Image (tube, rainbow, N blue to C red):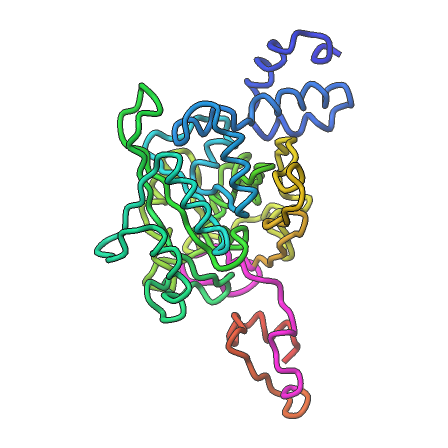
Amino acid sequence: MFLYTVDRSCINSILGLLPVYQVFRMYRVSVRVSVAVHHYVRTTWTLDTFLDRWFGPDSSEDVMDKLDECGAIISGSTVLQFLSRLPPNPESDLDIFVPLTGLLEFGRWLQRTGYTYRPRGTSPMTFFDVAALTVPARWSAGKHAPVTFDPLSFVQPFEVFDFVDETERRLDRTRSERLQLVVILGDPRKHILTFHSTVVMNYISGSKAVSIFPISTVDAQVSWVCRGPPSVGGAVYGAHPSWREKYKARGYSVVDGYGPEMTPEPNELKLQRSIGDTYTWTIDFERAPVFARRGGLSDPVKERDKVAFEIITTSRGPVTSGCYMNISPPFTTSFVDESTFAITGTFAYLDTWPYGGTFETIAAFGV
């Protein structure tokens, strides 16, 4: 009753003293308490000023509209700061993940807002449009292709485009702001399931903020390693060992396959999961997506469609060396040549079958 009757500023002060996971648990106390908590969540987890550093004041609506239009999401350590009720780290870049179909439009929009495209390394393509339009050709030719991912993973080609903002958006600026536009072949939400560990498997879209492993990340502050170092098959992108020290310094326990198994494992590490399931934390920004407000536009993100995935931990079976768990697409017989199996009693794996001959595959099909 107290939270329901006191001034809103007092409520915000009280809830601001609680750990993040306790704030969300208070939704279950009662209807009246949930009203107070809902107001706090709406006013605390807002992008109104969070993105000012990269896009200037009063820019959040334009940014969120563009995310919607292009099917893009923001991810990386910046989203972790947002979920933790902290301002962006002054040394962090902003990472935006966009499907190939939205790359050209998003990059052109960044340039209109004041960003300048900076080619990586010795790339001869100094103009963004040229670099963007030739991505499919480079992927087809195998140029600039990512190192092979772990065998049990969502395999998606990607490429990183660097942008720098040297305009004076803010008077307290100490350096040029950097932004990485990462183009993905397919759904960007699947790509974040290939990150080095669960601590960064969070994202912001034009309508919501999502944490896929919230109990581990926000409550227990545990980061489960999902990708091995490059020497054992991990991709170079995001696999640099410095990330471990960074998150350890921020108070996270980094759990890999070299230590003892964690017992009991949290429920969010169950075998079958999907983005948007009951274990996922979702903060709804309560704004109509741009395609709904303007009419006539299709929904490129289709967030209403859940992305299913499977978790294999060291307690369930073999995982990639240096990892505590692997995240993979759910097992499906569509990858197996069933006719060959029926005739010969053996499996014939197609080129798209991502699991090879793992113990999990053998166990799943009873071979």
Left or right placement of residue 285 versus residue 196 in this view: right
Q: Where is residue 31? Give x, y as percent.
A: 78, 23
**Viewer-proximal residue, 125 or 183?**
125
Q: Quadrant location of the C terminus?
A: bottom right
Compared with 318, 303 (above or below) is: above
Compared with 176, 241 (above or below) is: below
- Point out the residue furthest to the right here: 31
Q: Is residue 329 magenta?
A: yes
Q: Find the magenta span and give its range.
A: 312-341
Q: Quadrant location of the N terminus?
A: top right
Residue sitting at 33 percent across and 66 percent down? 143
Residue sitting at 45 percent across and 51 percent down? 103
Q: Where is residue 332? Give x, y as percent.
A: 64, 69
- Point out the residue furthest to the left here: 122
Left or right placement of residue 154 versus residue 241 in this view: right
Q: Where is residue 140? Give x, y as percent.
A: 40, 70
Compared with 129, 245 (above or below) is: above
Residue sitting at 63 percent across and 34 percent down? 284
Left or right placement of residue 355 versus residue 336 in this view: left
**Viewer-proximal residue, 133 or 30?**
133
Q: Residue 344: name its quadrant.
A: bottom right
Q: Residue 145: name its quadrant.
A: bottom left
Instruction: Tell how many labels.
Output: 0
Q: Where is residue 289? Give x, y as percent.
A: 63, 38
Q: Is residue 141 magenta?
A: no
Left or right placement of residue 273 versus residue 87 in this view: right
